Amino acid sequence: MTRTPLLNMHPETLEASTGEAHALLATAKSKLGFVPNMYGYMAKLPPVLANYMSSYDAFRNQSGFTPAEQETVFLTISRVNGCTYCMAAHSMIADKKSGVPAASLAALRSGKELPDAGLQAVAAFTEVMVISRGNPGKAAVDAFIQAGYTEQHILGIVLAIAAKTFSNYVNHLAGTTVDPVFAPYSVD
């Protein structure tokens, strides 16, 4: 699915880019095997792409969440923010790489309760963090801690929200077309 662009932006390409944009896009291609469409738009202002890549990698490597929990966080943020591009991308990653069970993935995509209690706790707390703009209230924080999560996990969600703010917002503005690799997971 393609959103209607809010800006008349043309993405940077690996072949035509120079300087920092080129270096970032080349790094993405070497890590991922292709340059995702959203990266081309982010590269229009290289610090956007650089900070996205940095916060994304830091979340993946330092948040303390399992791969399935990471996708739960990213999918919840993207669903709440209405980012169809990131919903497709993270649905594919959840299914093919992160081991999110099919029933949990379906629930994440539709905003329903997850059958796995741990993943449900992650999704519920992430959603309240996004909706409350980082002010979830003491009861929500306590419930998340009581579900077995830590301060590190809470700060990891803050980090994921930062990463997804870069990607979700740029995708809204650019009307980013879902890459073919993610297309089977497109949402309306």
Image (cartoon, rainbow, N blue to C red):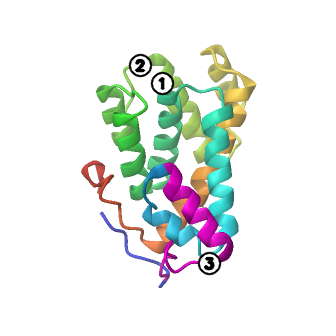
Residue 78 lies, in percent from the top left, at 48, 49
Mark 2 packing: few (<14 Cα in 10 Å), some, or many (20+)?
Answer: few
Instruction: Please say if the residues under marks 3 and 1 sit with CB atoms less than 8 Å apart.
Output: no
Residue 20 lies in quadrant: bottom right
Q: Residue at x 57, y 37 (%)?
A: 126
- Asked which secondary structure carries label 1, the reply is helix
- Asked which secondary structure carries label 3, the reply is loop
Residue 180 lies, in percent from the top left, at 29, 58
Mark 1 packing: few (<14 Cα in 10 Å), some, or many (20+)?
Answer: many
Instruction: Please say if the residues under marks 1 and 2 sit with CB atoms less than 8 Å apart.
Output: yes
Whether residue 183 is in magenta: the answer is no
Type of amino acid at the residue the image marks with label 2: Asp
Residue 18, which numbered label? 3
Type of amino acid at the residue the image marks with label 1: Leu
Residue 182 lies, in percent from the top left, at 33, 52
Name the residue tied to disc 2: 116
The boundaries of the magenta stretch are 9-31
In this rendering, the label closer to the viewer, 3 or 2: 3
Q: Residue at x 42, y 71 (%)?
A: 175
Residue 119, which numbered label? 1
Considering only vertical position in the picture, is 169 above or below 152?
A: below
Is residue 179 something one can see in this rendering?
A: yes
Left or right of 179? Residue 46 is right
Type of amino acid at the residue the image marks with label 3: Thr
